[in-house]
Amino acid sequence: MANKLTLAILGPGGIGGLLAGLLSRAGHHVICLSGEDTAGHLRTHGLRVRSARFGDFTASVAADTELRVPVDAVLVTVKHTALDAALTRVPSAALGDALLVPFLNGVEHPAALRARYGPEAVAPAVIRVESTRVAPGVIEHASPFAEVDLTGDQVSRPRLDALARALTEAGPTTRVLPDETAALWAKMAFLAPFALLTTRHALPLGEIRTRHREDLTALVAETAAVSRACGAPADPAAALARYDAFPPATRSSMQRDAEAGRPLELDAIGGALLRAADLHGVPVPVAARLVGELREAGY
């Protein structure tokens, strides 16, 4: 990868739009892949980013409905519920030898993407940020941080380092981690209890950690046990301390999707947790109950 990269963003929503805007502002050639209406809007108006951390700015981006030109990497920033349809915008032949970098929740997607695009193409990433698309082409970055962990057990380290350098110079603090399983489960172990409990009870985190403390503690322990069984380290006490440090009004993305009537990533998060637990013989009664109740509620 050269100093200035050509990067495609598959799904210029809250996360993808923020990354696209920052990377474009840093001088990289950015192509947003989306439906025709969104692509047309972005070609005409660009991306407007409002961020206390990175400032307010408008970035010019290219936009298309499908990948048609060579790129250094494709950043996949759609949700699991839209993944299958979105991937039709990135034909295998068009990807070529570019990296495919999924910023997806859960732990099962790397295997599916490698089966589709090849083992050396996929470099899973984890991002910690609160960023929302509030209107077409308008992104609000609310968190005082934007941090990326980039992995890829089968990707050469120089390729990961080059992308990490581009991301860091554009804004998000990015590190390359040597253990893909540990990186993905570190997020899963935090996200699953947070998402399942806030969505099931339709309550912010502050009320979950007081009114439903017993379930939170049990679910953190269950998720940590599954994480360890999958070969990743886990620290339940540290996870609980992180929950306690968050502002009490914090809501999960899954909870916001439920409130808005959007499809939930229940299978990618809760379902994947149950499948991993079953595979390794780890009992997870609280997780199973919560996933079952959410499914019974129509999610």
Image: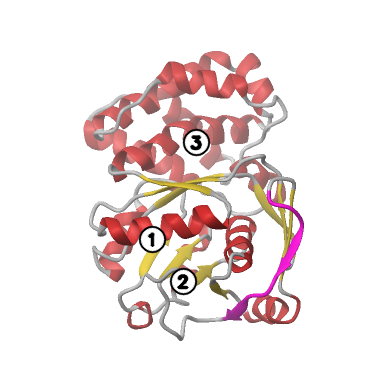
Question: Where does label 3 land, which residue?
Answer: 191
Give the quarter of the image for residue 200. top right
Question: Where does label 1 land, which residue?
Answer: 162
Dot 3 lies on which element?
helix
Residue 55 is a magenta residue: yes
Q: Amino acid at mark 1?
A: Ala
Q: Nearer the viewer, residue 70 or 167?
A: 167
Dot 1 lies on which element?
helix
For residue 123, say whether it is visible: no
The answer to whether the residue labelled 1 contacts the one labelled 2, judged by CB atoms less than 8 Å apart, is yes
Between the residue at mark 1 and the residue at mark 2, the CA separation in whole angstroms equals 9 Å
Q: Amino acid at mark 2?
A: Leu
Q: Amino acid at mark 3?
A: Leu
Give the residue at the far bottom of this rendering.
68
Question: Where does label 2 land, which residue?
Answer: 5
Q: Nearer the viewer, residue 109 or 165?
A: 165
Q: Nearer the viewer, mark 3 or mark 2?
A: 2
Give the residue at the far front of this rendering.
3
Between the residue at mark 3 and the residue at mark 2, the CA separation in whole angstroms equals 31 Å
Q: Earlier in the sequence, mark 3 or mark 2?
A: 2
Residue 92 percent coordinates (x, y): 34, 78
Q: Is residue 215 above or below residue 49?
A: above
Between the residue at mark 3 and the residue at mark 1, the CA separation in whole angstroms equals 28 Å
Residue 55 percent coordinates (x, y): 74, 53
Q: Which residues are magenta?
A: 54-64
| Mark 2 surroundings: few (<14), some (14-19) or many (≥20) residues within 10 A | some
Residue 26 is a magenta residue: no
